[in-house]
Image (cartoon, rainbow, N blue to C red):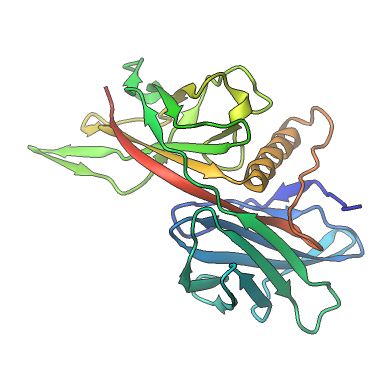
Amino acid sequence: MRKFYPLLIFPLAIFVLSISSCVDEYNGGINDVESNLFIFAELEAGEQLELRVLKTSAFGESTNIQFPEDAVVILDFGAGSARILYDASKDMYCEELITIEENKDYSIDVTLERSSLDDITASTTVPVSKGFETAAIFKSSNDLDQLELNFSIAFDDMQLEDYYHVLPYFYISKIVGTDTIVGIEKNYVKFGSLPRDLDNINSLAHRDGVIFNGSSIDGNEIAFKGLAGVTLESDEVIENITIETRTTDMSYFHYHKQLSKQILLDQTNLGEPVLVGSNVVNGYGLFGSFSKDVKIMILQ
C-alpha cells in the first residue's frame, strides 16, 4: 500500500517554475529515518519540459535538502524517449527540443546514481483544452481598494470528468499626460464568493486561482466574484482582465486541492489532517499536465 504524508510548504517556495505558470511547492512530511525523492512538473501543452528533482533526508527534527544535478532523467513520449539534462541556470531538468502536445502520453523515470533509493516513475496524459467564453466583466464597487469584479465562464463541451484551474489577472496602467502606460506586473484576482459546492470548487491557499471539476456545476457555466486586492493611485486604472483557464489532468487537480486544504488546516488548527496524495511511484510530488486558453476582456 502506498504511504501518504501530509505536506508542508516552504516560506520561500522551494519549487517555483520560472515560466508563466508560477508554482509554490512543498517539502513532504519526512519520515525520521528515510530519505525521500521528490519530483515536480506541470507539463504545459505548447511548452518545453521543466522538472524539479529534490532529495531529502531527515535526522530527528532536522532535514537535509539536496537538489541533485546528476540524476538520470528519462522522458518517454510515445514516439521515442530522451534523457533530460540538468540546466544550472534554471536549477531544474529541461529539454528545449521537445514540445509538449495535447492528448499525448508522457512518462518519466528518475534514477539517482550512487543512491539506494529506488527509481521513481510517473505518467500523465496532457488534456485537450476546452474552449470557453466569458460574459462581460464588470466592477460592482467604486472603492479603489475594494474593487469587486464579477464574471462568468461558459465552457464548450464540459464533461463530468474534466478538471479546471481558472486564473484571472490584470495589469495596472498609469496615465501620463495623454498616454496610458501598461504595467508589467501580473496582479491576480482574489476570489471572494464561490459557487455552492465548496468541496469541489476551491480557491487555492498556496497559489493563485480557483480549481473545480465538471461535476461541480450545473450545465456548463460558472459565475465568480473576486477582489482586485490592490489600492490604485489617482493616476492608475485597470482597463482589462485576462482570463487564463487551464484544462488539467486529474493528478494536477487533486494534488492542488489537497495541498490547499492542508495549508488551510495548518493555519486554523481545525479539522482532521489532510493526506496529500502523489502520482509518483516510489517517490512523492506531482507529474501533472495542462493545456490552457486565454482571453482578454475589457473591464466594464
- In-image side of 120 versus 196 (left or right): right
Does the image show residue 172?
Answer: yes
Does the image show residue 201?
Answer: no
Residue 213 appears at what percent x and percent y? 60, 32
Residue 294 appears at what percent x and percent y? 37, 42
- In-image side of 211 versus 183 (left or right): right
Residue 147 appears at what percent x and percent y? 37, 22
Name the residue at the front extreme. Answer: 79
Residue 92 appears at what percent x and percent y? 57, 70
The residue lying toward the viewer, choosing from 256 and 25, is 256
- In-image side of 97 versus 182 (left or right): right
| Quadrant of the frame with the C terminus | top left
In the image, what residue occupies the spot 75% across and 51% down? 278
The residue lying toward the viewer, choosing from 280 and 57, is 280
Question: On screen, 182 above or below 120?
Answer: above
Question: On screen, 149 above or below 254?
Answer: above
In the image, what residue occupies the spot 45% across and 25% down? 226
Name the residue at the bottom extreme. Answer: 114
Asked which quadrant contains residue 144, the reply is top left
Question: On screen, 180 above or below 291?
Answer: above
In the image, what residue occupies the spot 68% across and 78% down? 71
The residue lying toward the viewer, choosing from 224 and 229, is 224
Question: How many numbered discs?
Answer: 0
Asked which quadrant contains residue 284, the reply is bottom right
In the image, what residue occupies the spot 41% across and 33% down? 132
